[in-house]
């Protein structure tokens, strides 16, 4: 769910997420149910739902869980609101916090407290978001396909970039072309992605010492532990 130091330690992050599987799945389920309430339960006609399902699959939510959610009629009770908090963490790190909440006062209070108690501060709308770009990200394990073969396939795709990192490849797309690109990769025989999602990617990153990064990680983990928080993104390398 987090964008901080994402690709450098993704396997570690997924392990940490597995330890909080129940909370993670509840957040993903809420996102799917809100998408259904807004646009119906047919993924073929509800792009928001398709993206929510892809995100859930990328976090290893079982297909059986997703199937049950698609058959569930959304409750007519509490309405969830989407909002994004922008702020700065320790050492001037930029942080975006995406939330889905049925209680704005509760969410505002807990997010504000997390920043304040960990050396950060909230900013105004637009104070941080301009430092990020919304992109589709498809992460592929290098053991799945050789680099030359992947580059050959990539040449036929309408994508923004392919990045080669130790242990994996990252394919970047425009948000509207993310789902089509994923399907084209699957048609080319590439399966079992490490991660597939539309994410907020920093335009430039900053590098911190291990001690400094540990302080920022503390704030990010506290935010991620909040039930109202769907994703946290930073500009750490």
Image (cartoon, rainbow, N blue to C red):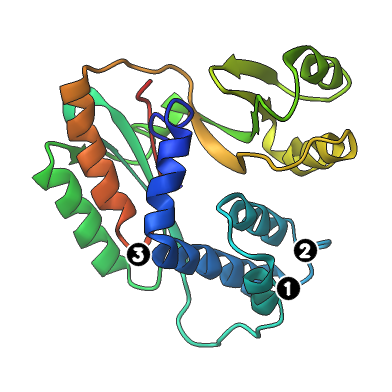
Q: Position of residue 75 (x, y in %)?
A: 56, 86
Q: Nearer the viewer, mark 1 or mark 2?
A: 2
Label 2 sits on residue: 43
For mark 3, what is the residue?
227
Spatial CA span between label 3 and label 1:
24 Å
| Element type at mark 2 | loop
In this view of the protein, which residue sits in the foreground, 126 or 168? 168
Secondary element under disc 3, as helix, strand or loop, is loop
Q: Residue at x 28, y 43 (%)?
A: 220
- Identified at 67% across, 53% down, the residue is 54
**Side (left or right) of 165 relative to 57:** left
The quadrant where residue 106 appears: bottom left
What separation in Å lies between label 2 and label 3 (alpha carbons)?
Answer: 25 Å
Residue 27 can be seen in this image: yes
Query: Which label's residue is closer to the chain start, 3 or 1?
Result: 1
Image marks 3 and 1: residues in contact by CB distance under 8 Å:
no
Which residue is pictured at 75% across the width and 18% down the height?
Answer: 146
Q: Are marks 2 and 3 in contact (CB under 8 Å)?
A: no
- The percent coordinates of residue 69 (x first, y second) are 64, 76
């Amino acid at each position: 769910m987090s964008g901080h130091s994402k690709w450098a330690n993704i396997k570690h992050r997924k392990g940490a997420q597995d330890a909080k599987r129940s909370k993670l799945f509840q957040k993903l389920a809420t996102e799917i149910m809100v998408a259904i309430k807004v646009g119906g339960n047919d993924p073929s006609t509800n792009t928001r739902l398709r993206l929510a399902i892809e995100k859930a699959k990328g976090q290893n939510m079982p297909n059986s869980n997703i199937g049950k959610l698609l058959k569930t009629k959304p409750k007519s009770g509490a309405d969830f609101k989407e909002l994004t908090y922008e702020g700065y963490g320790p050492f001037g790190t930029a942080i975006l916090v995406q939330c889905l909440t049925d209680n704005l006062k509760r969410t505002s209070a807990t997010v504000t407290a997390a920043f304040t108690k960990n050396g950060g501060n909230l900013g105004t709308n637009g104070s941080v978001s301009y430092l990020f770009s919304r992109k589709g990200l498809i992460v592929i394990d290098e053991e799945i396909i050789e680099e030359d073969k992947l580059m050959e396939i990539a040449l036929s795709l309408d994508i923004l970039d392919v990045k080669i990192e130790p242990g994996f490849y990252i394919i970047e797309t425009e948000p509207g072309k993310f789902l089509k690109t994923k399907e084209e990769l699957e048609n080319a025989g590439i399966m079992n992605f490490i991660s597939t999602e539309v994410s907020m990617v920093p335009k430039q990153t900053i590098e911190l010492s291990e001690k400094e990064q540990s302080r920022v990680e503390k704030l990010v983990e506290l935010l991620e532990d909040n039930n109202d928080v769907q994703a946290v993104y930073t500009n750490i390398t």
